[in-house]
Image (spheres, rainbow, N blue to C red):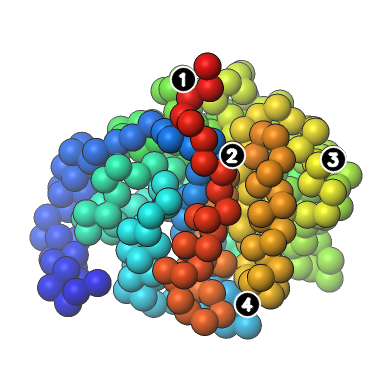
Amino acid sequence: MREEDYRRLLDDRAWYPGRVADTAALRRRRPLMVDRDQLLIIAADHPARGALGVGGRPMAMENRVDLLDRLLTALARPGVDGLLATPDIVEDLLLLGALDDKIVIGSMNRGGVQNAVFEFDDRFTAYDAQSIAAMRLDGGKMLCRIAPEDTATAATLESCGQAITQLAGHGLMAMIEPFWSGRVDGVVTHDLSPEAVVRAISVCQGLGATSARTWLKIPVIDDMERVMRATTLPTLLLGGDPAQDPDRVFASWSKALRLPGVRGLVVGRALLYPPDDDVATAVDTAAGLLEISGGTPS
């Protein structure tokens, strides 16, 4: 980001808050699916849950200007279709002119702050369906961690179901990220066995009054063939924290992307904070894994 762009952003935030809505009203939009069967969405909603760590760097995402720089680089690369983020980041990027012709998905429930005693209380503290529609975004994303031993799960399930129904009423995508979860020594963990992922998918794809506009966002695990047989919904693969060897991660994505029903990747930290900090190369590598198609099936 140029210094003058940074200063202008600060001034817009302080002096001209109405420019956020004005810019959103003028943003050039695009259909979800255009010239290929799969999408690449860059995710940046982790900071709103206090999840600032990447790999061995516990405060990697603390610098907002650095994060915006990385997002600007990623969004400008060929093959990147859009952004998943909370209102603060979406609005920064709107004011910087980076979201024209991009899919923009608003992150909705950020109330489950990382490592808090109330982490499973995933309240909807960011976007709701009405504000997503008013801002002319393209959908909403929600985290749905199912913890059978935590009573907060019931409220999360109910809220996710309501959000899916409301988004569908506006003709917008509902992206739900299901996990079968619990606590180990007080720390929230996800069961990534095929059985647990299938169970979480089975619960979450039944939420809401309609699943017509519901998409899934799930992690890449062993036996993805079995996992993908659990649903007919469009499915995006979760990138996760790049703690593993990047070559191994990309290879696992490439294999999973070949499965029927997989419609692309939603990746944040693995592309924005690669081990060598070369964002452009990491994004280009991920984009190269996606399947090219001839457009809308006949």
Amino acid type at circle 3 is: Arg
Circle 1: element type: helix
Mark 3 neighbour class, 10 Å CA radius: few under 14, some 14 to 19, many 20 or more:
few
Mark 2 neighbour class, 10 Å CA radius: few under 14, some 14 to 19, many 20 or more:
many
C-alpha span from label 3 to label 1:
32 Å
Q: Nearer the viewer, mark 3 or mark 4?
A: 3
Q: Earlier in the sequence, mark 1 or mark 4?
A: 4
Which residue is denoted by mark 2 in the rendering? 263
Q: Are marks 1 and 4 in contact (CB under 8 Å)?
A: no
Mark 1 neighbour class, 10 Å CA radius: few under 14, some 14 to 19, many 20 or more:
some
- The answer to whether residue 284 is above or below residue 173 is below
Q: Earlier in the sequence, mark 4 or mark 2?
A: 4
Q: Are marks 3 and 4 in contact (CB under 8 Å)?
A: no
Q: Where, by quadrant of the figure, is residue 269 drawn?
A: bottom right
Which residue is denoted by mark 4 in the rendering? 55
In the figure, is residue 227 to the left or right of 125? Answer: right
Find residue 228 and report its horizontal and vertical position in percent.
76, 38
- What mark, if any, has residue 288 been given in the picture? none
- What mark, if any, has residue 169 been given in the picture? 1
Q: Nearer the viewer, mark 3 or mark 1?
A: 3
- Residue visible at 35% across and 66% down? 73
Which residue is denoted by mark 3 in the rendering? 226
Q: Where, by quadrant of the figure, is residue 54 drawn?
A: bottom right
Which residue of the protein is positioned furthest toward the front in this rendering? 294
Find residue 141 and report its horizontal and vertical position in percent.
52, 42
Mark 4 neighbour class, 10 Å CA radius: few under 14, some 14 to 19, many 20 or more:
some
Circle 2: element type: strand
Q: Nearer the viewer, mark 4 or mark 2?
A: 2
- The answer to whether residue 229 is above or below residue 170 is below
Q: Earlier in the sequence, mark 3 or mark 2?
A: 3
Q: Earlier in the sequence, mark 3 or mark 4?
A: 4
- Residue visible at 36% across and 75% down? 66
